[in-house]
Amino acid sequence: MTMFSGQHKVLFSRRLEQDWQDLADYFEIPTDQRRSFTPGRGPQGVWEWLEARDKLAELPDALHYIKRDDIMAEVLAPPSIPAPTTAVTWDGSPFPGLHPFTPNDAAIFFGRTLETAALLDRLRQERFVAVIGASGSGKSSLVAAGILPHLHESSNRAPWPWVRCTPGGLGNDPFVALAARLESGLERHGLNGRAIADKLRASGDLATLADRFLVGSPEAAQLLLFIDQFEELFTLCQPEFQHRFIAMLVRAVQSPRLRIVLTLRADFYHRCVEHSRLAALLRTGSFPLAAPDMPARLSMITGPAAVAGLTFEEGLAGRILRDTGHEPGALALMAFALAELYTACQPRTTLTHAAYDDFGGVQGAIAQRAETAYAELEVGAQQALGEVFKHLVEVDPERGIPTRKRALLAYFADAPAAQQLIDGFVAARLLVCDDPEDSDAAVEVAHEALLTHWSPLHDWITERFDDLRSLRHLRLEAAEWDRSGRIAANLWRHERLQPVAEMLERLQPVVLSDTERDFIRPEAERLLEEIDDPATTHQRRAIIGDRLAEIGDPLPALVWDSTVTVCLRLTGYQFRVG
């Protein structure tokens, strides 16, 4: 390790502060020697004790153990960062904020050099790789800005065309989402999106379509399929499609001209291993992505700034690093704060402490931006918050985790207040929206950090948490009932449907599919319909009568009590009292 200087010692001592006791415990410095340290100068005492025993080289492991990697990253071994020059190579903001990096952002993608090289090597050796990490760990950005731009750089290999899709990108059918991305390469073969989706759904023969897609490419060329946010297969897509879509992927990796890379939130890993063949792929094809360490995060802060000709006021980069912390989702908060910092300091090229303080720093940036955008709305648009976000948020019924979901803009066509809220939050970069001119245009939350860091929305989700979870459970059960042949015996009974009706009333208006509406028809209505069927036996009528007497006859035209009503309908008479 490089020898440390006196300046290193001074800066180390300033930063370590009261954590010197933890460091002394790590190195088992005897109590009597700790007492010999000059009062108020414990960090210097630890340094001098280590220096006298030639143990300074052990500091990196020790600081990591006590969660003070920031001292290594900023003081003792800061990463090499390109210095800003007058020859700026990036125009505009080098910080995408909540939006993931794209292949066009490779020049400002820092902090993942090792991961990029390792993943690229894995992808060239294997036909299936799943990048698995926590929400906000940068999985999508690693593939998009780290991998895709490098597929064309190897001179001894044919370039690999690639397509990116998200399973829930166009509704609840992952085959439609994938077909839309393949369409541009297959139109010349007379295949449109609908035909492609039908073929994939029917046979799962992605390999044949890949061969057609690559017609005219060098013989060694391969098609890279990038499936981003794979968890959408379980959160947004109908269960009936999950098995076939996974079976299609398992079959596709056998093709010599196809490779697949997907990104998956770690908390949905258990859903994948429920499918044995997908579990087999994951055993050899998993690429776990940890949160970046402190040096990598510092590179993410200072590297893009240097490329864009920006400088930080002294100590600001380290302050942002410390404020970011290690919590899940912290990377997204840091990214948003950097984007806000750039905007606040324009047109200057120096990023300042004052601007950082104005918007609340890393922890306050998203909340302040959301609060500002919300305050600028008319009262009616503010009151549409629940109407909008009940379409953009759902709760996983198994794990109880709020996640984002897409919603068609068409849902809000007749709701001007909701449209105004969407427009305001899109302008604030808190929501992402497709081209409104597109008939399938959708809107979604830019990042799940918004769901937890803006109090009004977080409070609304907390208040509606059980309702959102129940709604998701209802949709999953209805889809399974439909897939299984709509067996009447599997429909929910009155006692189970009552809380569903109450939930739907609280979330009104809720867009339900025909299948979902059929699934939650009141049990009494179904029973009365069965009574009206001449084929219903007297024995069955008697059972229905007892059940209807128990739960009540809902027919509004009959004003007698439920017992009389049931008896009349049991004998086949039809009365209407008016």
Image: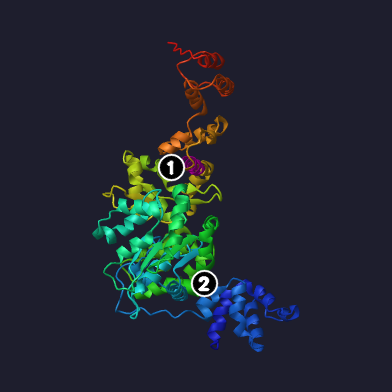
Q: Where is residue 221 drawn, in percent x and y?
A: 33, 72
**Tag 2: Cα neighbours inside 10 Å, few (<14), some, or many (≥20)?**
some
Q: Which one is nearer the viewer's eye here, 195 or 237?
A: 195
**Label 1 Cα crowd, 10 Å radius (few <14 / some 14-19 / many 20+):** some
Q: Which amino acid type corresponds to the residue marked 2 in the rendered image?
A: Asp
Q: Main secondary structure of the magenta part?
A: helix
Q: For residue 293, which numbered disc appears in the image?
A: 2
Residue 513 image offset from top left, x and y in percent: 41, 39
Who is closer to the viewer here, 243 or 153?
243
- The answer to whether residue 500 is visible is yes
Quarter of the image for the C terminus: give it.
top left
- Which stretch appears magenta? 471-482
Q: Label 1 near label 2: C-beta < 8 Å?
A: no
Q: Which quadrant of the rendered structure holds the N terminus? A: bottom right
Task: Residue 100: tell me if it is visible.
Answer: no
Asked if the stretch drawn in magenta spans residue 475, the answer is yes
Q: Establish if 205 lies above or below 561.
A: below
Dividing the picture into quadrants, the one containing residue 24 is: bottom right
Q: Is residue 532 above or below residue 139?
A: above
Q: Give, as a three-letter code, the residue at label 1.
A: Gly
Element marked by disc 2: loop
Q: Earlier in the sequence, mark 2 or mark 1?
A: 2
Q: State the SS at label 1.
A: helix
Per the image, the residue denoted by label 1 is 386
Spot occupied by residue 337 in the image (x, y as percentages of width and height): 42, 63
